[in-house]
């Protein structure tokens, strides 16, 4: 565990010292602050303010995750920085776990910073502390964790551009799975079986999208929340395990 | 002792290292020579556990290199190393040292290594701002973070100016004096002749010679004898 934390700390440092990281974060904060202007247009409608703010956190969280994660393992192999690590008493599994943890910490830091700005904006405009908004942000963070695992997996086999493309496709499909299954059920036959296969194979990211519920003040069930947490941990775990197997087989 | 027995490695149909066997005694400095693409880097990568051999085995200090604990006593400097450009030299040293466990070395010990390798003044600078020679020195410095018994250097003198080469050679000689076992790949034969007790010459993956430098040279310069031997194979 010690080596995992050492690698995570190093990954985190490298990530948060990237100038582009700050540029994205700056844009994200500006975007959320635009909520103050939107609040005037929406005559203080909290639904509009919350929708806009939470969407901002999600979109910019996704951009930061993909930007930082698309080359995370690939870069280590191509630039041979991995040579320094693997020639020491470190396993490849520790490298993958450390990279995952470090990147997730960087993404979590970004999300927390954006959430602080969001809470401030909502508090300023509605005089209410948006606790449910924080719950939605927590679930967004779970989704980002899963996407980090997706990126770690793809980054251990493909170049950054391909990893980015595949991750974007996964996110897109991941948010459509519910609709795909619903349509498949109506059509039936092979289409249903195919949509069922898609449903179980791809990560169902809709489980983490609580934004619509939150902005309308609808709370989630503890059962649903626990299931989503377990799903994120299990799916991410499988991807990380896959990445470890791939890196173990890879010639350096 | 480093013991390499019947080591082979193929990439596809190409045999990169072919049935290589070597023994390097404790405290010895061994120069591994060969042309570009002869199999030197692949061999050193297999020795330090970066690449798995297709056949054969490697033991370091009696432990198989697959055993992760064998790497506790190893220091490795890759060829033309790349670094985490946004870390400072000192942060990188600490990172490498921390991989050997908590409290591996104190900050002042890392500072001593950086002083010895001549980059102490740049310890708080981002590595991205280092020159090629400074990066080479940092690559050398990180091999010493765990006070290794066995030091593997892949082209350690590449990219250094004459003064830098002189300094690194001086450090290698100090390490020899401290009883360290040093294995290095090089194509700078003049330096090899000066530093090594024994040499190995590899050509197209096959070991052509392993033995004392003086025996090999027989009064002639190493470079001349090396070229002679390689040309005989072509």
Image (tube, rainbow, N blue to C red):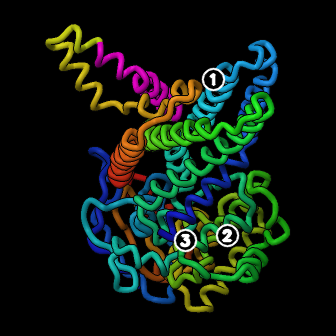
The reply to whether the magenta stretch includes residue A167 is: yes
Give the residue pinned by disc 3.
Answer: B99
| Badge 2 density bin: few <14, some 14–19, many ≥20, Cα 10 Å | many
Label for residue B93?
Answer: 2
In the displayed structure, A131 sits above or below A35; it is: below
Per the picture, the main secondary structure of the magenta-coloured stretch is helix
Name the spot of residue B195 as percent of width and height, x first.
Answer: 61, 79
Question: Of residues B38 and B151, which is closer to you in this image?
Answer: B151
**Marks 1 & 2 on one chain:** no
Residue B125 position by quadrant: bottom right
Residue at the image point whose x is 74% and y is 56% from the top: B127
- Chain letter of the residue beneath label 1 in the structure image: A
User: In 3D space, how far apart are the residues under numbered discs 2 and 3 (Cα atoms)?
Assistant: 10 Å
**Marks 2 & 3 on one chain:** yes
- Chain letter of the residue beneath label 3 in the structure image: B
Give the residue pinned by disc 1.
Answer: A51
- Answer yes or no: is residue A67 visible: no
Helix, strand or loop at label 2? It is: helix
The single residue placed furthest to the left in the displayed view is A189
Nearest to N terminus: mark 2 or mark 3: 2
Question: Of residues A121 and A158, which is closer to you in this image?
Answer: A121
Relative horizontal placement of residue B202, taking residue B111 as reference (left or right): left
* Tags 2 and 3 touching, CB below 8 Å: no
Name the spot of residue A92 as percent of width and height, x first.
Answer: 42, 59
Q: Which residues are magenta?
A: A160-182
User: In 3D space, how far apart are the residues under numbered discs 1 and 2 (Cα atoms)?
Assistant: 46 Å
Residue at the image point whose x is 79% and y is 77% from the top: B115
- Answer yes or no: is residue B119 visible: yes
Relative horizontal placement of residue B20, taking residue A127 as reference (left or right): left
Which of labels 2 and 3 is toward the front?
3
Question: Of residues B22 and A49, which is closer to you in this image?
Answer: A49
Relative horizontal placement of residue A84, taking residue B117 as reference (left or right): left
């Amino acid at each position: 565990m010690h080596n995992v934390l050492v690698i995570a700390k190093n990954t985190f440092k490298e990530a948060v010292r990237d100038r582009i990281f700050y540029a994205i974060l700056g844009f994200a904060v500006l975007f959320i602050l635009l909520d103050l202007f939107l609040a005037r247009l929406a005559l203080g409608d909290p639904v509009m303010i919350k929708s806009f703010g939470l969407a901002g956190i999600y979109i910019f969280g996704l951009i930061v995750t993909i930007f930082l994660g698309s080359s995370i393992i690939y870069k280590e192999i191509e630039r041979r920085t991995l040579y320094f690590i693997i020639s020491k008493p470190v396993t490849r599994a520790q490298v993958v776990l450390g990279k995952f943890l470090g990147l997730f910490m960087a993404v979590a830091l970004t999300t927390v910073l954006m959430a602080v700005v969001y809470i401030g904006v909502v508090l300023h405009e509605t005089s209410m502390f948006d606790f449910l908004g924080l719950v939605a942000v927590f679930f967004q963070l779970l989704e980002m964790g899963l996407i980090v695992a997706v990126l770690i997996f793809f980054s251990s086999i493909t170049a950054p551009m391909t990893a980015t493309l595949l991750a974007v496709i996964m996110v897109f499909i991941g948010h459509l799975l519910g609709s795909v299954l619903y349509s498949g059920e109506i059509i039936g036959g092979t289409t249903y079986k195919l949509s069922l296969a898609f449903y179980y194979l791809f990560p169902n990211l809709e489980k983490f999208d609580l934004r619509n519920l939150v902005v309308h003040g609808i709370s989630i069930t503890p059962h649903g929340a626990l299931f989503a947490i377990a799903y994120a941990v299990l799916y991410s775990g499988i991807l990380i395990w896959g990445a470890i197997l791939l890196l173990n087989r890879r010639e350096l | 002792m480093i013991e390499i027995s019947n080591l082979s490695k193929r990439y596809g149909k190409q045999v990169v290292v072919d049935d290589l066997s070597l023994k390097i005694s404790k405290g010895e400095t061994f120069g591994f020579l060969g042309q570009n693409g002869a199999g030197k880097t692949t061999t050193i990568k297999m020795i330090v556990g970066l690449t798995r051999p297709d056949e054969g085995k490697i033991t370091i200090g009696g432990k198989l290199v697959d055993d992760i604990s064998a790497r506790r006593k190893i220091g490795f400097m890759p060829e033309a190393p790349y670094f985490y450009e946004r870390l400072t030299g000192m942060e990188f040293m600490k990172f490498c040292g921390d991989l050997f466990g908590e409290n591996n070395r104190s900050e002042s010990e890392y500072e001593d290594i950086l002083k010895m390798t001549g980059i102490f003044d740049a310890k708080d600078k981002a590595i991205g701002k280092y020159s090629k020679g400074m990066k080479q020195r940092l690559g050398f410095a990180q091999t010493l973070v765990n006070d290794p018994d066995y030091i593997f250097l892949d082209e350690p003198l590449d990219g250094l100016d004459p003064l830098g080469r002189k300094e690194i050679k001086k450090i290698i000689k100090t390490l020899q004096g401290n009883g360290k076992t040093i294995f290095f790949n090089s194509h700078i034969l003049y330096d090899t002749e000066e530093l090594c007790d024994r040499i190995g010459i590899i050509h197209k993956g096959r070991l052509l010679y392993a033995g004392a430098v003086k025996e090999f040279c027989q009064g002639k310069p190493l470079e001349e004898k090396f070229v002679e031997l390689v040309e005989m194979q072509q």
